[in-house]
Amino acid sequence: MIRVLIVETAGWVRDGLAALLSNEPDVTVAGVAGDGDEIVAIAVETKPDVALIDADLPTKDAFAMAHELRAELPDCAVVFTAARFRPGDMRRATAVQVAGFLPKNTPSDVLTSAIRRVARGERVIDAELAFAALSTSRSPLTARELDVLRLVAEGLPTAQIADILVVTVGTVRNHLSRINNKIGAHNRVQAIRIAQESRWL
């Protein structure tokens, strides 16, 4: 029996996935979670074979959380589902040893097949996401945005970055806001991590 942990922020999606998987003869729902902060604790308690995780968790970086989960339970295969694909997502997923990456609109039979495959040790990546990753391997950031992010990564405060680049503090903040929007980061720390894992810096 394949034990699955469902991590999904939307309650109706979470309930639908639980109902779908409960109807499979060789799959059981080991646990459910809607908050990224509780995932590792639930996983340690329930010992799932597969963790099906929403890649757009609002409370925690899903990639960092997958890394924590794999550290605690190395035999648990992680499958991400995403409503949108952002530049660098596939590279970040590979870096944290995610076993599967599927869009949210994946048909139910494909999803259940993917769960079985990753439970056997295989990797499952949606073909469209894979091709999108190949087409977005180059940095979406401008040269100036990369300059700003490099200086942030060096630990320099906003005012000093503004002095070095001979711009205003407001301009630096605008650059950081655009960087976050482009690559789907929630803050500058996550933006640095995404850029480094994607080898843009």
Image (spheres, rainbow, N blue to C red):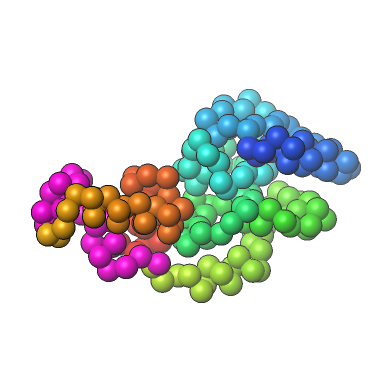
> What span is in magenta?
140-164
Residue 150 appears in the figure = no
Could you tell me which residue is drawn at 13 percent across and 49 percent down?
160
Residue 161 is one of the magenta-drawn residues: yes
Q: Position of residue 79 (x, y in %)?
A: 64, 49
Residue 16 appears in the figure = yes
Instruction: Please indicate whether residue 11 sits to the left or right of residue 28 in the image.
Output: left
Instruction: Please indicate whether residue 37 sits to the left or right of residue 198 in the image.
Output: right
Say above or below: 39 vs 81.
above
Q: Position of residue 117 (x, y in %)?
A: 73, 55
Q: Quadrant of residue 114?
A: bottom right
Residue 146 is one of the magenta-drawn residues: yes
Could you tell me which residue is drawn at 57 percent across and 37 percent down?
73
Could you tell me which residue is drawn at 56 percent across and 46 percent down?
56
Q: Nearer the viewer, residue 115 or 194?
A: 194
Say above or below: 146 vs 155.
below
Q: Nearer the viewer, residue 35 or 124?
A: 35
Instruction: Please indicate whether residue 27 sits to the left or right of residue 69 in the image.
Output: right
Say above or below: 195 vs 47.
below
